[in-house]
Amino acid sequence: MYRVIASVLLLCALTALRGPPGYCAEKSASARVGGEVSAGKWKALRLRNLPQAARLAVEVTTSIEVGVLLMDQRAYRRLPATEEALFQGRTGDHITFSIIVPHSGNYYVVIDNRDGKTSSKFTIAVRAAAGTAQQGLTDVDQELARLSDTLGKAFIFDSLTIRAAKCGTANAFSGAKGVVICAEYAQKLLDTLDNKKKAADALMFILLHEVGHVLMRQWDYPFYNNEEVADEFATVLMVMFGQEDRARAQAEYFAALPTSTELEHKLAKDDRHPLSVQRARNILRWVDDPQLVRKWQPVLVPHMQTAFLKRLQQRPTAWTSQALVKQELATRSK
């Protein structure tokens, strides 16, 4: 299942990145506004009455580095909390992204200068097109919904949305209830690994890394925001489901990234990720650790679906902790 989903995701994301025509633009609207946001403040552009399934394209230009967010009305009312943003990025110059509108209503493009020490000028250009969404991203969203459903058969968690989008940057990120994988990240994987299968494998790893952040946060684990823990979580899931080769593909990708460029980036920004070369070593060490998944069972078993626990009890795997499974099932039967 995971291999099929990742392959379709890679194909559709790259198709979307190239930007073929695929949506009806009979009903469309565009706007461009400029302004200035003071240091320590944010400003927002309200987009009124966007219809469900419309494609929204946003382009933001700024004079200094600021945060850029896209939020529905419910999330906007929760500012300064930003966990439920549909898109969240940073730019010191120019950023573009697009999404498929998940439900009808008002949306907000937020220029966040709360961390800034000087004011920033900005320009926001938006275009909304009603009609059938761009087919590439629509197809991949359906495949990602299947991934969420697959995880839901093994684990208990609140609603989890996994979406693809054109972000203007090679990235993947998560919020309180969802994950966004950028089409540009899929392209970077393919360019670096020069192998479609390995790129799809690595893409699945980074998806599970972001899913790990979401699930561990929902499960109230204090280490949910630790990037190294999220890497280990993704490795654990891949080993559990017999996908070790996919974790190795991600390690190969990390090992191929230039360390000098990363060091410059870390000096310029607060990046909590370990250096990619260290992430590669960690993944390979974890994959070869026969006790890896068993060590994670106290974290995972309390959040496994009852039907999944019963299958593990009847047909235990090499990593199954039968004592923990039995104890959890006994607790739930009371």
Image (tube, grey):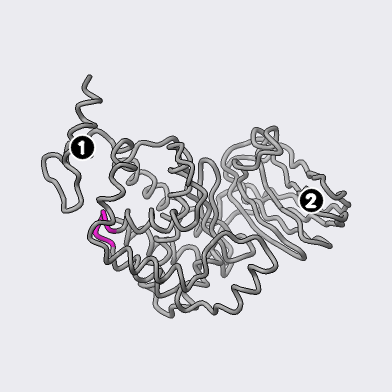
Which sits in the foreground, 303 or 105?
303
Q: Residue at x 66, y 56 (%)?
A: 89
Residue 8 image point, x, y percent: 39, 62
Decide which of 81, 73 is in the foreground and name it: 81
- Taking depth in this image into account, of 166 and 76 the one nearest to the observer is 76
108 falls in the magenta region = no
**Mark 2: amino acid:** Asn
Q: Can you tell which mark lies on residue 325? A: 1
Q: Amino acid at mark 1?
A: Val
Q: Position of residue 180 (x, y in %)?
A: 53, 53
Element on which disc 2 rests: loop
Q: Nearer the viewer, residue 254 or 32?
A: 254
- Seen in the picture, residue 262 relative to 58 is either above or below; the reply is below
- The residue at the point 58 percent across, 38 percent down is 103
Relative image position of residue 94 (x, y in whole percent): 75, 64
Stretch in magenta: 239-243
Tell me: 135 left or right of 200. right
Q: Which mark is residue 113?
A: 2
Secondary structure beneath label 1: helix
Residue 251: quadrant of the picture: bottom left
Q: Quadrant of the C terminus?
A: top left
User: Which of pointers 1 and 2 indicates the residue nearer the eye?
Assistant: 1
N-terminal of the pair, mark 1 or mark 2, is: 2
